Image (spheres, rainbow, N blue to C red):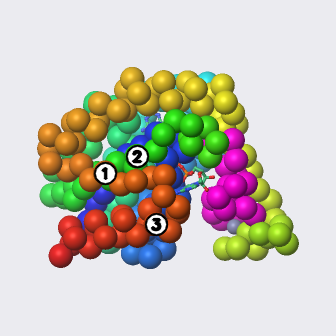
Amino acid sequence: MNIILLGPPGAGKGTQARRLVAERGMIQLSTGDMLRAARKSGSEMGRRVAEVMDRGDLVTDEIVIGLIEERLKDDHGAGFIFDGFPRTLAQADALGELLARLGQKLACVIEMQVDDEALVARIVARSTCAQCGEGYNDIAKPIPADGKCEKCGGTQFIRRADDNEESLKQRLMEYYKKTSPLIGYYYCKGKLCPVDGLADIDEVAASIAALLDQKAG
Ligand code: ADP
Ligand code: ADP
Ligand code: ZN
């Protein structure tokens, strides 16, 4: 079953995607993670996108569609979770074509509904384990008191270069201008499934699980 997690920066897409990977064996395709990996590797493309990402602007459709196309060749197992992709109508059309070519379907688009106040608070509190990528939050999910990642025991935690208020404002603007039209797009295709993203992490996970079980059943 292939699904999209749609929502503004900080909505909880990565948090829920990691749970679906652990609990259902689905494959997370996060274009944000792929782009950060490209930056870290020092590749030509990574160097080109670094400044754009730090500013909070969107990377070109061509680059992210290329990244996704490459990964769709992998065995899909229990299905793909598109996390942070598509972010424009052109990306949504491209994804539809790629899936059709592979004889694959989109089960649903989970729209994670949150409000802007909560996003700012969440993002300035966000950190990630440097070793395994587990997400933490100073308020909702603090790093354990012994300073060790609960998943891997790692002791280093990183904060993203673009997780500051200024870049977040720009990312939110990009979301409203370019990504939010996808809500109407997928509604018209009968794929939209809204979820209350303001509930706590376990509750959001339970709502998503119920939706997926209903789609599978
Ligand atoms: P968040 O978790 O805050 O939603 P992501 O990790 O998904 O952010 O993305 C970080 C940055 O990477 C974005 O601000 C943008 O510059 C770039 N990016 C990620 N996915 C896409 C995409 N599908 N299209 C264009 N740019 C993208
Ligand atoms: P996204 O991938 O959509 O940008 P993340 O999953 O990285 O969002 O979540 C952003 C921050 O908010 C992280 O620090 C995460 O731990 C925290 N968070 C995620 N879901 C919730 C939730 N339901 N309630 C409170 N905090 C949350
Ligand atoms: Zn870890």
Among the 4 quarters of the image, the one containing residue 124 = top right
The dot on residue 161 is none
The reply to whether residue 11 is in sight is yes
Earlier in the chain: of badge 3 and badge 2, it is: 2
The dot on residue 203 is 3
Q: Amino acid at mark 2?
A: Gln
Question: In front here: 62 or 183?
Answer: 183
Earlier in the chain: of badge 2 and badge 1, it is: 2
Among the 4 quarters of the image, the one containing residue 64 = top left
Q: Amino acid at mark 3?
A: Glu
x 14%, y 40%: residue: 188
The reply to whether residue 4 is in sight is no
Q: Amino acid at mark 1?
A: Pro
Name the residue tied to disc 2: 113
Q: Tell me the distance, in whole angstroms, between the alpha carbons under discs 2 and 1.
A: 7 Å
Q: Tell me the distance, in whole angstroms, between the alpha carbons under discs 3 and 1.
A: 14 Å
x 36%, y 64%: residue: 208
**Label 2 Cα neighbours within 10 Å, binned few <14 / some 14-19 / many ≥20:** some
Name the residue tied to disc 1: 194
Q: Are marks 2 and 1 in contact (CB under 8 Å)?
A: yes
Considering the numbered disc 1 on the image, is that residue within a helix, a strand or a loop? strand
Residue extent of the magenta highlight? 123-143
Earlier in the chain: of badge 3 and badge 1, it is: 1
